Amino acid sequence: MAGNDLGSLLGGLLGGSQGSGPGSAGGAGNVLGALLGALGGGQGGTGGGNALEGLIGMLTRSGLVDQAQSWVGTGENQAVSGAQISEALPDETLQKVAREAGVTPEQAADEIARSLPTAVDRLTPSGEVPEGRSIEDLAREQQL
């Protein structure tokens, strides 16, 4: 499954793919991989880049403008809570992510809140979201 492959890449990007439970880098990667897959980024090609753009747009529209911009930008990353993530994401998306990652929706939201700032920051080292690039390609490049 592409989500698992993406989860492995994101787990490595977040500091190694050791472990598989929530809170571990591998668990964080699996949750983020499931999230980006649910948003259309599970496949290669331009859809992956659009998933990151779509996610940033979704968070921005949900009132998390400052947080999302801080993750993409080159300054300090602002924190976000699991409750804010739950509010920002469509319920069906969070349910799907939780199911695929084998956790509750609340655990998924908390894991996304913990790991998303670092993942977005590392996927956007130049301070902007790369257009037309898959998340898989971006993750592979940043692991060099």
Image (cartoon, helix red, strand yellow):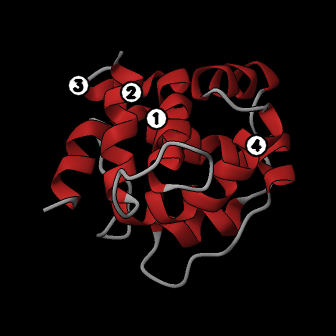
Give the alpha-carbon distance from disc 1 to disc 3, as whole Å.
16 Å
In the figure, residue 80 lies in which quadrant? bottom right
- Disc 2 marks a residue whose amino acid type is Asn
Q: Earlier in the sequence, mark 1 or mark 3?
A: 1
Residues packed near mark 2 inside 10 Å, few (<14), some (14 to 19) or many (20 plus): some
State the residue in front, 67 or 114.
114
In the figure, residue 125 lies in which quadrant? bottom left
Q: Is 142 positioned to the left or the right of 17 in the image?
A: left
Q: Earlier in the sequence, mark 2 or mark 3?
A: 2
- Disc 4 designates what residue? 107
In the picture as drawn, the residue positioned furthest to the front comes out as 19
- Disc 4 marks a residue whose amino acid type is Gln
State the residue in front, 3 or 88.
3
Q: Earlier in the sequence, mark 4 or mark 1?
A: 1
Image location of residue 141, percent across then percent down: 16, 54
The numbered mark at residue 4 is 2
In the picture as drawn, the residue positioned furthest to the left comes out as 144
The residue located at (57%, 72%) in the rendering is: 70
- Disc 1 designates what residue? 33
